[in-house]
């Protein structure tokens, strides 16, 4: 018989197409779950630590102390009916794999699983997890770009494609983008710009940049990194 402690009432009323179950409420899981709540998404949080569960009572739509590897508990909580489940367990490799394997067997269509190492990620991918995320590695790469000083934000879409926020180099100041040939010269595309204190605007061939502007640039990761380093 499944055993769990439930806070926030029964999760049976959760909208199955939009609600998200977050399994593992450590720092990453909590941050994710609370951000989803801020965005208006209903969240079912699941963790084995009762103190953690109680601390999130009334902050998540429903929060449960349960073993995510317990099939009866997951069925009683309605997890197999949800379309979106995140396995945010990182510190216990076996628990992560067991929970993920169960979700796959139960037919959950959209599973995101946190990997804490390449080996962990490889196992999850071999199981057939559609979305494997490496939050520590991804944050490390992002911060590495930020600490260099010229990149104000860096988002890697894939390992070979990124978006950066930076100031334009001197060669683009006061020149129509149509004349700058950024794509041909640098292999990147300027997609938006913002004046100090202003709002982001899509650029056009007629856009002329100022030295205090910020720009969003997309392209191959190596090329956008090189663009951001131009003086």
Image: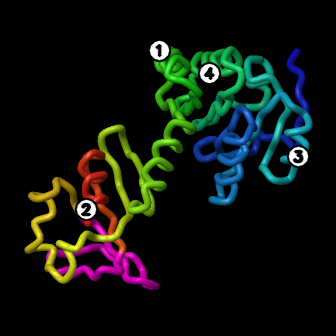
- Residue closest to the eye, 168 or 215: 168
Measure the C-alpha gap from mark 2 to mark 4.
Answer: 45 Å
Which class describes the residues within 10 Å of circle 2: few (<14), some (14-19), or many (20+)?
Answer: few
Q: Mark number for residue 189?
A: none
If you read the primary sequence from the N terminus, does the residue marked by circle 1 or circle 3 appear first?
3
If you read the primary sequence from the N terminus, does the residue marked by circle 2 or circle 4 appear first?
4
Residue extent of the magenta highlight: 190-213
Per the image, the residue denoted by label 3 is: 55
Which class describes the residues within 10 Å of circle 1: few (<14), some (14-19), or many (20+)?
Answer: few
If you read the primary sequence from the N terminus, does the residue marked by circle 4 or circle 3 appear first?
3
Measure the C-alpha gap from mark 2 to mark 3.
Answer: 48 Å
If you read the primary sequence from the N terminus, does the residue marked by circle 2 or circle 3 appear first?
3
Measure the C-alpha gap from mark 1 to mark 4.
Answer: 11 Å
Which class describes the residues within 10 Å of circle 3: few (<14), some (14-19), or many (20+)?
Answer: few
Q: Is residue 192 magenta?
A: yes
Per the image, the residue denoted by label 4 is: 100
Q: Is residue 149 magenta?
A: no
Q: Position of residue 72 (x, y in %)?
A: 78, 18
Per the image, the residue denoted by label 2 is: 230
If you read the primary sequence from the N terminus, does the residue marked by circle 1 or circle 4 appear first?
4
Q: Mark number for residue 126?
A: 1
In the visual, does 6 lie left or right of 69? right
Measure the C-alpha gap from mark 4 to mark 3.
Answer: 25 Å
Q: Does the CB distance between marks 2 and 1 fall below 8 Å?
A: no
Q: Position of residue 213 (x, y in %)?
A: 34, 78
Q: Residue 6: which quarter of the image? A: top right
């Amino acid at each position: 018989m499944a055993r769990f402690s439930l806070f926030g009432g029964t999760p049976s009323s959760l909208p199955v197409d939009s609600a998200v179950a977050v399994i593992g409420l450590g720092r990453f899981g909590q941050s994710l779950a609370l951000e989803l709540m801020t965005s208006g998404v209903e969240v079912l949080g699941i963790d084995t630590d009762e103190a953690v569960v109680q601390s999130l009572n009334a902050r998540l739509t429903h929060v449960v102390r349960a073993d995510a590897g317990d099939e009866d508990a997951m069925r009683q909580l309605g997890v197999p009916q949800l379309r979106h489940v995140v396995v945010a367990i990182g510190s216990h490799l076996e628990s992560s794999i067991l929970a993920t394997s169960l979700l796959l067997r139960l037919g959950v269509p959209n599973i995101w699983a946190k990997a804490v190492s390449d080996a962990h990620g490889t196992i999850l991918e071999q199981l057939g997890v559609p979305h494997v995320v490496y939050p520590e590695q991804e944050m490390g790469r992002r911060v590495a770009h930020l600490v260099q000083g010229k990149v104000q934000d860096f988002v890697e879409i894939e390992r070979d494609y990124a978006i950066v926020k930076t100031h334009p180099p001197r060669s683009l100041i006061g020149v129509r983008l149509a004349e700058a040939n950024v794509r041909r010269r640098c292999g990147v595309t300027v997609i938006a710009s913002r004046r100090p204190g202003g709002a982001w605007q899509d650029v056009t061939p007629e856009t002329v940049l100022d030295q205090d502007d910020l720009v969003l640039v997309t392209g191959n990761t190596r090329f956008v990194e090189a663009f951001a380093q131009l003086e």
